[in-house]
Image: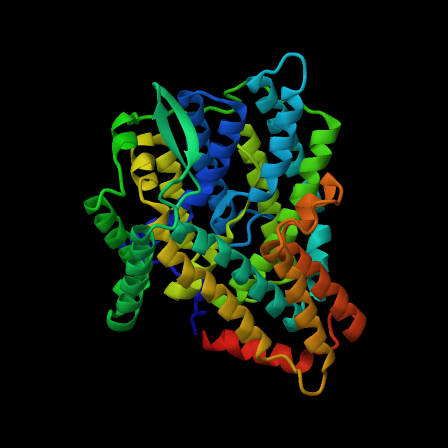
Amino acid sequence: MAETRHAVDEIIPAPQLAALGLQHVLVMYAGAVAVPLIIAGALGLNADQRALLINADLLACGLATLVQAIGFPGVGIRLPVMMGVTFASVAPMVAMINAAKGGSAFSANDTLLLIYGSVIASGIFAFLVAPLIGRLLRFFPPVVTGTIITVIGISLMRIGIGWAEGPLTVVQVVDGAARVVPNPDRDSLGGLGLALFVLLVILGITKYAKGFLSNIAVLLGIVAGGIIAALIGKMGFADVARSPWLGIVLPFQFGMPRFEFVPILTMCIVMVVVMIESTGMFLALGEMTGRKVGQDDLTRGLRADGAGTIIGGVFNTFAYTSFSQNVGLVGVTGVRSRYVAVAGGIILIMLGFIPKLAALVGAVPVEVLGGAGIVMFGMVSATGIRILGGVDFKKNRHNLFVVAISIGFGLIPMIAPNFFKNFPLEMKPLLESGIILASVVAVALNAYFNGGGTGDNAVGEARQSALAADI
């Protein structure tokens, strides 16, 4: 009898694969290019240098995604994972830039080379320590996993709602010079209405369409929202017209990286944060796809985060992580094939070499993505809640404490952003991530109440397996 291929390994027909991959790219694009734009602004780079950072980022996103989704010996989790620049690296990199500006002879190019050196070194560090993090999997039973995934969805919802509100800042040309100013139209009724329109389109297609059309409900919703945005003047094409057709991205295009101890140490801490967050993402995807994530799988996935970060430093960009925005899309579409992420990775590489197409994708207003974000990120939380539904709370009331206190800690950065303002700067990457706080507290409380990874879990693990089988 022939062995049945798991849905994760299913190869979908090329036209459908391209549409599903594009759907993933549209969902992640705004987040993918945000960090290069922030760093370019902090350094005061010119338009050509800023475009180079964006092109390099898209190329590295695609390459890192292929490593993660296709998988190579010892590297890559082989799940539908999209890779993008981690926001956890922004604060340390901006701190490096500010420190350089405080010196006697500031050079944006030299500062970039210092950042790239720390990025490459931290990627090597993550690659080497991935097996150590992978061994912690036994401390993630259903009560911990469900809690973390729930907090991931709640934390992401802030991004989705922020998309619906519109961008915080816009670029205005004043006296011939481009300046970044606060967005005067943020929270406008037009933008919120656009997000609501996209949400309603997605819901309508999800309910009434069948088969493949239902799977690309988010893509169709974004396209419909883009058309309406263009008609009402919220989607401009000036950047598309200015962008060239061909962009060249070469390794070490700004020069050879510089390696200094303190920046490297700082970025290594960032990579610890990235790996802990990625662990939650991988467990969420394992639940959504019905493929159990074991210790070896986790190690391969975390190594891919390190490999992606090395690729980022080599190709003039930054630290990479498994993009949480796209986890919810897997739950919304029900499409579990990792080759959808492979298609998305190929599209990202194409965008890196064709700036005009990248500008067209980037022209989609974030308000359009807001309607899709509420659906996708809510789906992540729903997955966590579903896992918690299989945990034994009746016979083991300690599990209630694990969930309640962990979620409370996870909400601190969202509810009180300045809560940890008096803590040392080096701890900020750990303390300002609700996912990290929830993960650490959930693991610690489960170890305290349930003796590590097995105290509550005969019922929970059986229920989790049954849920995976039903997907």
Residue at horizontal 49 percent and vertical 28 percent from the top: 41
State the count of labels.
0
Residue 366 at what x, y percent from top left? 37, 47
The answer to which of 302 and 219 lies nearer the viewer is 219
Residue extending farthest to the bottom is 395
Q: Quadrant of the C terminus?
A: bottom left
Residue at horizontal 57 percent and vertical 31 percent from the top: 313
The answer to which of 81 and 318 lies nearer the viewer is 318
Above-or-below relation of 235 to 218: above
Q: How is the rendered protein coloured?
A: rainbow
The answer to which of 466 and 392 lies nearer the viewer is 392
- Asked whether, in this view, residue 184 is left or right of residue 64, the answer is left
Residue 263 at what x, y percent from top left? 69, 30
Above-or-below relation of 205 to 393: above
Q: Does residue 389 appear in the picture of this structure? A: yes
Residue at horizontal 78 percent and vertical 74 percent from the top: 449
- Asked whether, in this view, residue 100 is left or right of residue 197, the answer is right
Residue 49 at what x, y percent from top left? 44, 22
Residue at horizontal 53 percent and vertical 79 percent from the top: 466
Residue extending farthest to the left is 231
The answer to which of 13 and 230 lies nearer the viewer is 230
Q: Does residue 316 appear in the picture of this structure? A: no
Above-or-below relation of 206 to 219: below
Q: Quadrant of the N terminus?
A: bottom left
Residue 329 at what x, y percent from top left? 41, 59
